[in-house]
Image: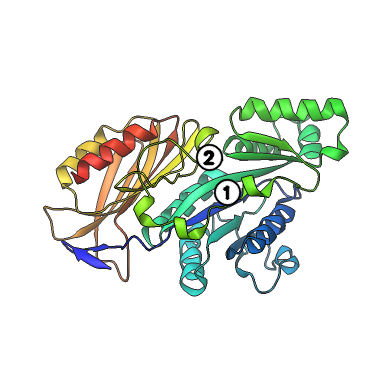
Amino acid sequence: MERLNGVTEHKTAEKLIPVHILSGFLGSGKTTLLTRMTEYYREMGYKPAIVMNELGEVNLDGQILDSDVAMTEMLGGCICCTIRGDLTLEIKALIDEHNPDVILIESTGAANPLEIIDGVTEAAMYTRTELRSIITVVDGPALIDRQKRPKDRTYKLMREQIRCATRLILNKADKLEPEELVLAEQTVREWNSHALLTATVRCAVDLGQLADAVPPATRTAAGHAGSARNNGELHEHSQNCGHHYDESESHQASKHESHDHVMAVTYYFHRPVDSKAFELFLQKLPENIYRAKGVLTFRDTPSRFLFQYAFRESDFIKITPQGTVHDVAVFIGEHFSRGALLEELAKLEG
C-alpha cells in the first residue's frame, strides 16, 4: 500500500469480497439454500465464509454445514436490532482470519432486511466488501395461509422481506395447488415487480446464476467503478440493494447496477476531497437517498471524519482510526439514479 496526503492507497491487487444476504421467514428454506450455495462455491474452487444469525443461544442450523467452512455465529439476538453493531466486527474477523472469496449471511427469520443492509454496508469502512444481493426465500404455503390475516405482524414482515429482495425464491411449490401457486406468485409480484422470481422445491435453483460466480482474481479494487453497462442480476432486476463491477472505468465505486427500489451504492475514494464541496454535495442529494455514511479525509483539514446523513441532515465527527479504515461513502435509498450519484462523487475527487 502507498499513502497519498495521509490516505492509504490500496494497490489494484486487493480484491473486493462480495456479500450475499439470505433473507426469509422462519422455516422458509434459507439454510437449505445456504448449504446449496456453499457447496456450489466450493465445487467451483472458491472459498466461502458464513455468518449465521439465530435468536436462540445455540446455532442448530450450523450443525449441518461442513466443519471446514469458515463460519461465525451471532446468537441470542437479531442482526437488525440488538446485535447489529457486531456484524461489522464479525465480517472483518472472518476476512482477517480466513480471507474468503465470498461471504454468505443467513439472517434470522425475524429480521427486517432494511436494517441488515445498513449493518452490512457499514463493513465497507473496514473491509473491501461489496453487497451483491439480497436473496429472499418465500415459504409458499405460509404466505397463502398468512394472507387470511393481512394485519398479522408476520405477514407484514414477510412483505418487507420480499420488497427488499434482488432475487426471490418461492419455495415449497410442490405443496401448493396450481391455483395457490398462481396466487402466491401474484402476491409476491405485487410487492416486488422487478426481482427475478423462481418457484422451487427445496430451493433447487440455477446456482451459477444465483451465486453470481465471478473468479475472485477479477474482483480487484481497480475495476470497481464506472458506468452501469454490464453484469448480472442485480443491475437489471430492480429492488436492488447491491453494487456492480465494471473494469472499464478509472475510479473506485463498488457497484451493482441498481435502478429501482431499495439500493445501496458504495464508493471508495482515491484521494481527499474538499470539505465544503462535500457538504454541498450532501445538501443536494435527492430525497430518495435517505441514508448515507462513511469515513473521509478532507484536503482542507488534517483530521479524518466519520459522517452520517439521514433525512436531509448531516453530521461530521472527528476520528482517529485505529488500524486500516478506508475512505468510503455508502448511500442507501430508493429509485435514485446510480449513474448520476457516481458522476457527482467522481467530480469531488477531480
Q: Secondary structure at mark 1?
A: loop
| Residue 162 placement (x, y as % from top left) | 63, 37
State the residue in front, 181 or 310: 181
User: Residue 84 at what x, y percent from top left?
Assistant: 51, 57
Q: Quadrant of residue 340?
A: top left
Residue under pointer 2 = 234
Classify residue 138 as left or right of residue 329: right
Q: Position of residue 7 (x, y in %)?
A: 22, 62
Relative to 166, is 218 on the left or the right? left
Q: Is residue 152 above or below residue 63?
A: above
* Amino acid tagged 1: Asp
Residue mark closest to the camera, 1 vs 2? 1
Query: Height in image: 20 above or below 7?
Result: above
Q: Earlier in the sequence, mark 1 or mark 2?
A: 1
The spot of residue 94 in percent (x, y) is 51, 69
Q: Nearer the viewer, residue 334 or 313?
A: 334
Q: Residue at x 13, y 56 (%)?
A: 301
In this rendering, the count of numbered labels is: 2
Binning the other alpha carbons within 10 Å of mark 2 as few (below 14), some (14 to 19) or many (20 upward) gives many
Name the residue that disc number 1 marks.
212
Discs 1, 2 touching: Cβ within 8 Å: yes
Which residue appears at 54% of the width and 34% of the height?
Answer: 239
Which amino acid, by three-letter code, is at mark 2?
Leu
